């Protein structure tokens, strides 16, 4: 299996660091608002990766954090804590805000058939681990105190900027406005913030009351649950230049190691070419889409149709296209359900091989969908149906649950009755009666087709 590693900018052959288990960390949601479908695209990507790894026979130990403290309005260290702001605006406690949006987020995962990672730890449950991490960084000479917090000294980290290709000197020269003059470098970031009195969430530390920086939670929790070095770290591309760069710096400072062997990033979902984001107010949620008649599976299909490293522009005509394609896929699949025909084993094997080659080539899911469509064009056979369900272990499009919908409704009662009588005649081996009834059905503009378990009626 090959995956693209942002760190090396190369497609690499993947092998777990130890044994058959893939240890994987995915940056999770900040639970101050409803996750939008752009966020969900990143989790669909995470899910596809987990599914392909499992399809390849690996066990996956996945960790996805829930950020319920420390994520400030800017990904750098400016502005208010997002949780605190939401709590103030909605007159609730940060805990209530987090509980509500976390549960809706998990419901959305379920609706989109995204497998929940094995562990989903919350930042506020790991304050001690984060503080210990901050103390270690300070002991190792990477942390320094200013009047508003403890900062990471990126000047001590020779590899800083490697993930994103940032040149630190250029960045320093480009930083015209120095927000915090006590910082040694403009890109130094807070690992612990001193809490002003009015800050609701605060914990005791050797510097008095405070709260953790955003980046430290991922370092502390990934180390706790996956160890100092694990296999894969995922997130959206917006994490590359700050959040993940900082996570790497923290790990180097605390353990001397880059925490993940492979760093993988999902591209943005865009609107009119720009990022879909809550700040811009151009977002939709999974529920809003459902209310507009786009099922979660139609949205999943929409995501699957574009490679995770390409931008995906969200438009309603494109969503309409995905909705129709998903319905057609269901129809194409149902032709094969319970069908009597067969397909040569070599042909089936060739389809499965093509499918596997695609999905193991840095998750080429659009290519694999192409294979599924081609296979479904074969003459009706249960073998094709079974192969499609096997492929769906990766797609996660809930193909086994697809049932004939429109067609059954369209069949009038008298035709249904004729079909029932024909079926009964056939069971009684009264072939003449069965044939006569079939002719009557055909005359009314319908076709009856025999299947393994019964029959179907379709409009001619
Ligand atoms: P947040 O809840 O803001 O921390 O973001 C959750 C996840 O969604 C992160 O992995 C982000 O990288 C990702 N993300 C945010 N906006 C988009 C977008 N427009 N398209 C795809 N992923 C996004
Ligand atoms: Zn993270």
Image (spheres, grey):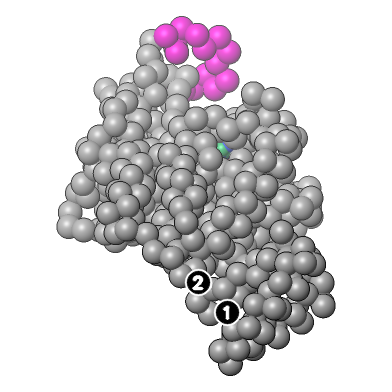
Could you tell me which residue is drawn at 37 percent across and 14 percent down?
Answer: 167
Which mark, residue 454?
A: 1
Q: 117 or 44, which is in the foreground?
A: 44
Which of marks 1 and 2 precedes in the sequence?
Answer: 2
Looking at the rendered image, the quarter that the C terminus falls into is: bottom right
The image quarter containing residue 272 is top right
Looking at the rendered structure, the secondary structure element under dot 2 is loop
Quadrant of ligand 1 in image: top right
User: In terms of depth relative to the viewer, which is nearer, 91 or 45?
Assistant: 45
Q: x and y percent of residue 257 in the render?
A: 23, 38
Q: CA distance from mark 2 to mark 1?
A: 9 Å
Task: Tell me, for residue 301, which label it has, or none.
Answer: none
Pointer 2 local density, CA inside 10 Å: few below 14, some 14–19, many at least 20: some
Residue 222 spot, x, y in % from top left: 36, 51
Q: Are marks 2 and 1 in contact (CB under 8 Å)?
A: yes
Question: Considering only vertical position in the picture, is 155 above or below 317?
Answer: above
Q: Which stretch is magenta?
A: 170-184
Does 343 sit above or below residue 148?
Answer: below
Residue 338's disc number:
2
From this viewpoint, which residue is outermost toward the bottom? 428
Quarter of the image where the N terminus is located? top left
């Amino acid at each position: 299996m090959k995956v693209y590693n942002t760190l090396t900018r190369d497609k690499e052959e993947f092998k777990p660091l130890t044994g058959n288990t893939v240890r994987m960390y995915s940056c999770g949601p900040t639970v101050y608002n409803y996750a939008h479908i752009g966020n969900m695209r990143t989790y669909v990507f995470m899910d596809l990766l987990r599914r392909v790894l499992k399809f390849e026979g690996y066990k996956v130990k996945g960790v996805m954090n829930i950020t319920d403290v420390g994520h400030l309005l800017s990904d750098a260290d400016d502005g208010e804590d997002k949780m605190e702001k939401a709590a103030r605006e909605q007159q609730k406690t940060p805990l209530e805000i987090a509980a509500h949006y976390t549960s809706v987020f998990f419901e959305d995962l379920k609706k989109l058939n995204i497998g929940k990672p094995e562990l989903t730890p919350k930042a506020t449950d790991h304050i001690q681990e984060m503080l210990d991490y901050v103390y270690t960084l300070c002991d190792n000479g990477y942390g320094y105190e200013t009047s508003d917090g403890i900062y990471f000294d990126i000047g001590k980290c020779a590899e800083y900027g490697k993930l994103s290709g940032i040149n630190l000197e250029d960045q320093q020269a480009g930083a015209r406005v120095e927000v915090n003059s006590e910082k040694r470098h403009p890109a130094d970031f807070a690992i612990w913030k001193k809490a002003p009195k009015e800050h609701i969430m605060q914990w005791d530390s050797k510097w008095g009351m405070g709260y953790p920086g955003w980046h430290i939670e991922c370092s502390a929790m990934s180390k706790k649950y996956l160890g100092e070095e694990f296999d894969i770290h995922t997130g959206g591309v917006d994490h590359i230049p700050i959040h993940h760069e900082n996570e790497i710096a923290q790990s180097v400072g605390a353990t001397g190691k880059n925490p993940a062997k492979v760093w993988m990033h999902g591209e943005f979902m865009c609107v009119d070419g720009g990022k879909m984001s809550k700040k811009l107010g151009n977002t939709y949620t999974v529920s809003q889409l459902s209310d507009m008649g786009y099922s979660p599976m139609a949205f999943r299909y929409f995501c699957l149709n574009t490679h995770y490293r390409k931008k995906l522009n969200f438009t309603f005509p494109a969503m309409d296209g995905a909705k129709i394609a998903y319905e057609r896929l269901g129809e194409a699949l149902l032709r094969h359900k319970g069908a009597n025909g067969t397909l040569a084993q070599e042909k089936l094997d060739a389809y499965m091989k093509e499918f596997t080659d695609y999905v193991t080539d840095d998750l080429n899911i659009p290519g694999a969908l192409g294979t599924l469509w081609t296979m479904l064009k074969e003459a009706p056979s249960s073998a094709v149906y079974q192969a499609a369900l096997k492929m769906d272990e990766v797609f996660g499009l809930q193909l086994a649950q697809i049932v004939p919908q429109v067609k059954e409704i369209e069949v009038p009662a008298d035709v249904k009755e004729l079909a029932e009588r024909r079926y009964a005649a056939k069971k009684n081996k009264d072939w003449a009666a069965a044939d006569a009834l079939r002719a009557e059905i055909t005359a009314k503009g319908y076709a009856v087709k025999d299947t393994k378990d019964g029959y179907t009626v379709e409009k001619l």
